[in-house]
Image (cartoon, rainbow, N blue to C red):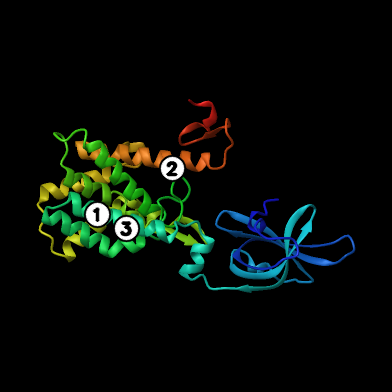
Amino acid sequence: MDNSLLNKYEVGQSVEIIGVVESVRTGTTKKGDPYVELMLTAKNERCRCIWWDKDNVEDLAHKPVKVQGTIKLYRDARNLWIDNIQVIRPTPEIMRQLVPSANSTEIEKLKKKLWSMIKTYVTTQPLRQLLVATFKRYLPDMANSPAASKIHDAYLGGLLRHTVAVASLAIQIAKEYPHLVNMELLITGALLHDIGKVFAYQVDNLVIERSQDGILLEHIVMGLEIVNKIISEHKIKIDEETLKLIKHIIISHHGQLEWGSPVKPAIPEAIIVHYADVIDSRLSIVEHELSDMKAGEIKFNKYVGYVLKVNEDSVE
């Protein structure tokens, strides 16, 4: 039984915990006493809660709650014996307690890095106008959006982290090929490549999942719509050829038709963004796998294949 939510508490301690009711099960003891067993989750942690002499609680399932009770041992594991439980409204602050999220310090660092990249590498007025207008409107959404529901960066703020990482990788790659790459076009495309994901996911019952628009339209189409909307609303005078190349980077960044791109990358900037996207997403998957592995352990992941956690003491 995973009771990791309770690990930081002592047996006998009175606690108050905010979480989501994952499941509800009623039962009776051998003596015939009725009880309710709730599984409570917060981010990636869970705990078992026991509520005595209660019934008609099935409507608590999948709702955010505040639970007050006492930590007690049951079958050699910590359990929370409930004294009181209250359904609460999931405010943004509570959402960050319950749904996997980047911390506020990391978010602020990422925002500063994004603005710094625009200031440093994008000086052409139409491109800078496009980026500034886009992120003035959508940066708060990126800071509260995942980059995926399961595969990589599946947490609030994951989209911002992934976007900044892809642009950073793209810059490093481009420095090896200065004669091939238009850095302003590259950074513009890299920072906008996943902008449609601000509408592609939602948190339903405190679980990250694809939105209806994400399912029906996909983030690439929505990304193009955002670019067109910003240009139109702000009357940005960007030449047709440059706009075509920016859109090409966005629609080709998955690299393969079977991966969701309608076309393959056809210019150096699009090729770089595609591979930067692959590198960051795959290493994010590997990082997640390694965090739960022991030295010397090998695990198979369907997206990246086998992952080995190296024993650093054995590597000279």
Q: In this figure, which residue is indicated by the disc labeled 2? A: 284
Identify the amino acid type marked 1. Ser
The image quarter containing residue 80 is bottom right
Q: CA distance from mark 2 to mark 3?
A: 19 Å
| Number of numbered labels in the structure image | 3
Q: Residue at x 23, y 40 (%)?
A: 270
Expressed as whole percent of the image width and height from the top left, the position of residue 49 reads: 71, 62
Picture layout, residue 88 above or below residue 96: below
Picture layout, residue 114 above or below residue 245: below
The image quarter containing residue 56 is bottom right
Q: CA distance from mark 2 to mark 1?
A: 23 Å
Expressed as whole percent of the image width and height from the top left, the position of residue 111 reads: 32, 58
Identify the amino acid type marked 2. Ser
Expressed as whole percent of the image width and height from the top left, the position of residue 178 reads: 16, 36
Closest to the camera, between mark 2 and mark 1, is 1
Kindly tell me whether residue 310 is visible in this rendering. Answer: no
Expressed as whole percent of the image width and height from the top left, the position of residue 21 reads: 62, 63
- Disc 1 or 3, which lies upstream in sequence? 3
- Disc 2 or 3, which lies upstream in sequence? 3
Q: Residue at x 47, y 55 (%)?
A: 209
The image quarter containing residue 102 is bottom left
- At mark 3, the secondary structure is helix
Name the disc covering residue 111, or none: 3
Q: In this figure, which residue is indicated by the disc labeled 1? A: 116
Left/right of residue 10 with respect to residue 234 in the rendered view: right
